[in-house]
Image (cartoon, rainbow, N blue to C red):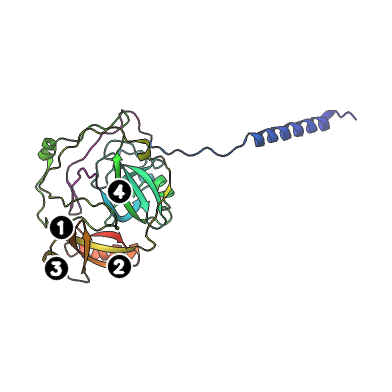
Amino acid sequence: MFLSGPLHKGFVIAGLLLLAGCAGARRQGPPPLEDHTVQVPANAGVYKVGNPYQIDNVWYYPREQPDYDETGIASWYGPDFYGKYTANGELYDGGQLTAAHRTLPMPVNVRVTNLDNGKSIIVRVNDRGPYARGRIIDLSRRAAELLDVVQNGTARVRVTYVSRADLGGGGPPPPETSAEIANALPAAPTGKVDSSALGVLPGAVVAPPVKLATLPAPLPAAPPPPAAAMPTGQVDKVPVPGVTHLYVQVGAFSKLENAQRMMKSLGGDLHISSLQRGGQTLYRVRTGPLASVQDADSALSRISGTGSGDAQIVVDQ
C-alpha cells in the first residue's frame, strides 16, 4: 500500500529519527580518561621562595624544604578566589590540581594523602595559605573532590614533598640567592631554638631542626620533574593506619627539661610523650588525643591564647 500526504511524511521522519538514534548508540563508547594535568600558561608565574611574613602575630619562614613531610588538617578554597593571582603570579583555577601552603617554595609538587580513606594525589603548590589556624594545606576544589574532602570541608592528611614543578616557559629557574634573601630577612623573633620538627606518622622522613638565623643555601637549577611527579589527577590508594588521632602539639624538644619548662609555663592539660627518631629521643609537649577536628580547633584556640604561637594540630597513631 502506498501512503501519501502527512501520514507518509510522519513515517519517513520517524524512520529517520530511529536510524539516527541507532547510529548514535553505535558511536557511543567508554568515556575518555580524565587528564587533570595543571595547565600553566607560557610565562605565567615565577619560581619563588619568598620572604618571612607575619599573620595574626605568627611568623612564617618560607624556605627550601625537599624533606618536607607533615601531617595535619587540610581544607579547600573555592569560587571567591577564581581568576585571581596566586602568590607566585599564576591565575587560580579551582578545576586544576593546585594548593596553597604557608612555607613551601612555589611552584612545587607535593603528594597529599587522605589518612581517612587512603586516597592520594599529587598537587601543585602555587599559593600561600591557609591562614586559618590548625590547617596545613588548602586544596583546590578539584583536588578536594578527588580526595573526598569537599563534603566534610576538612580531612586528616599527610603532605610530602615530591619535586619542584615546571613553569610555563620550561623548567624552573634557580631560587633567590642567599644575598637576596638576606637583604629582605627581618630579625627573627626570639624564642626556643632547640625544638625539632613536629611528630609525624611512623616511617616519615623528618627535616632536621632549622635555626632561624641560618640562611638556606641556594639549590641548583632543577630539571623539569618526571611525568610520574606531575599532578595528572591519578588517584592512588596507599596503606594508611587503621586509626589515627588528633593532637595539639606545642613543640618537640631534644632535652626533657626544656619540654618540662614549656609544659609548666603553659599549664592546662598538656603532657609529655617521647618518641625515638633517628637515634634521638624527642620529647613532645601536646594535648590529646582529641575526638574531632572541632575539638582540636577548640584546644588549639585555647593553647594559642596562652601565648604559644607555635602550637598546631598534628595527626598521629
Please say if 85 is above or below 256.
above
Few, some or many residues within 10 Å of mark 1 (<14, 14–19, 20+): many
Q: Can you identify the residue that label 2 sits on?
A: 289
**How far, Cα to Cα, is label 4 from label 2?**
23 Å
Few, some or many residues within 10 Å of mark 2 (<14, 14–19, 20+): some
Q: Can you identify the residue that label 4 sits on?
A: 160
The C terminus - image quarter: bottom left
Q: Can you identify the residue that label 3 sits on?
A: 260
**How far, Cα to Cα, is label 1 from label 4?**
21 Å
Q: Which residues are magenta?
A: 40-67
Per the rendering, the mark at residue 117 is: none
Type of amino acid at the residue the image marks with label 2: Pro
Of label 2 and label 3, which has the lower sequence position? 3
Picture coordinates of residue 52 (x, y %)? 17, 45
Quadrant assignment, res 255: bottom left
Q: Can you identify the residue that label 1 sits on?
A: 195
In screen coordinates, is 216 left or right of 138?
A: left
Say what secondary structure mark 1 lies in.
strand
Type of amino acid at the residue the image marks with label 1: Ser
Picture coordinates of residue 286 (x, y %)? 23, 65
Type of amino acid at the residue the image marks with label 4: Thr
Of label 2 and label 1, which has the lower sequence position? 1
Type of amino acid at the residue the image marks with label 3: Gln
Please say if 167 is above or below 316.
above
Name the main secondary structure of what is drawn in magenta.
loop
Of label 3 and label 1, which has the lower sequence position? 1
Asked if the residues shown at circle 3 and circle 1 are in contact, with their CB atoms under 8 angstroms apart, the answer is no
Of label 1 and label 4, which has the lower sequence position? 4
Few, some or many residues within 10 Å of mark 4 (<14, 14–19, 20+): many
Picture coordinates of residue 291 (x, y %)? 34, 67
**How far, Cα to Cα, is label 3 from label 1?**
13 Å
Quadrant assignment, res 292: bottom left
